Amino acid sequence: MEKQNLILAFESSCDETSVAVIADGHTILSNVIATQINSHKRFGGVVPEVASRHHIEEITICIGDALKEAQVTYDDLDAVAVTYGPGLVGALLVGVNAAKVIAYTHHLPLIPVNHMAGHIYAARFVEPFQFPLMALLVSGGHTELVYMQADGQFEIIGETRDDAAGEAYDKIGRVLGVPYPAGKVIDEMAHQGHDTFKFPRAMIDEDNYDFSFSGLKSAFINTVHHADQIGETLDKNDLAASFQASVVDVLVSKTERVLREYPVKQLVLAGGVAANHGLRERLTAELPAKFPDMKLVLAPLKLCGDNGAMIGAAAYVQYQHQQFGDATLNADPSLEFDWMPNMVH
């Protein structure tokens, strides 16, 4: 039997400490995730200092659990991979330093991975990528349309100019009294309500592929505050449904437009908000008929949030092209997608 390529992958960019062992870039041997949601819930969002402390407490436990679950030792590994950005600098540093120590101690190559590339490669566990492909990347901090002509080549075609979609969900969640993180609950509420408020669809007709969700957030908050002032009670499910309808309309219409201009073999939906059932349902219902030659690939629900497995999948591509880091690797909290230019020649 041919030896598998084994990568130990770290993810600690926000409020999830995760360590995974990935074989050949597409098989999950373990994917241990220690979430901090309960710690941040009382603050209504992630507190960076609290997140960093939790990562320090959890990371060695996660490493041990990941190796044990995968039934491998350090001697079996071929490389160590780690998210080095974008994210919270203190949180990233915990993962980066843990990965550097293991790589140095066990003489293993170190692979620095862009967190957003990791989200895209979460879909690689569903099926192999076919290029060119387009990724609709929707998360707490990012909303982007990313064009890929080959593995490791990323071209941003459109991105958010202000709030990301996930950010907007959390902000209106506070107004609705929904605990952080609000996305899942608002999605459930939306399925029980109706789009009665007809919130604005920002930039939906503009001749670009960028997004803006701050106007929608403001319209939502103003509607709720006005009702409070005049003593009117609004249906929270209808508010959630109206908000979600606006977000999904904009995401789907921009995606359909970009697919007409950039014919691709696959559309990958990835990122934390890719778990949203409203968005999944619309894309699944509308795209196959409009783009019969294109395959819609949805990142697995359990891999939409931050996790080590997706970092291992992205890292495998870099491993094959000898894209390694060294002891000088540092966290880059505002890392962009120009991290691996023209990797494939």
Image: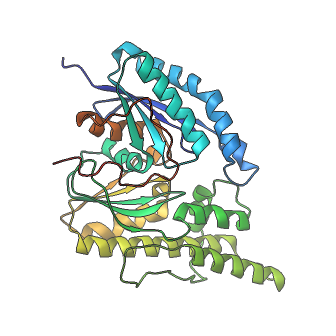
What's the coloring here? rainbow
Of all residues shown, which one is farthest toward the front?
Answer: 328
Question: Does residue 9 appear in this view?
Answer: yes
Question: Which residue is at the far left?
Answer: 345
Which residue is more in the foreground, 67 or 90?
A: 90
Say if 256 sits above or below 273 in the image. Answer: below
Q: Quadrant of residue 73?
A: top left
Judge by depth and name the residue closer to the eye, 88 or 27. Answer: 88
Q: Position of residue 155 (x, y in %)?
A: 31, 60
Number of labels in the image equals 0
Residue 231, can we see it?
A: no
Q: Quadrant of residue 241?
A: bottom right
Using the image as rendered, state which of residue 290 and residue 146 is in the foreground: 146
Which quadrant: the N terminus?
top left
Residue 121 in the image, given as x and y percentages of width and height = 35, 46
Q: Is residue 38 left or right of residue 134?
A: right
- What residue lies at 19% left-to-right and 19% top-to-bottom? 2
Q: Quadrant of residue 213?
A: bottom right
User: Residue at the spot x=62%, y=74% of the render?
Assistant: 217
Residue closest to the eye, 204 or 56: 56
Q: Position of residue 48 (x, y in %)?
A: 66, 46
Residue 32 is situated, as x and y percent measured from the top left of the image, at 51, 30
Q: Is residue 47 left or right of residue 279?
A: right
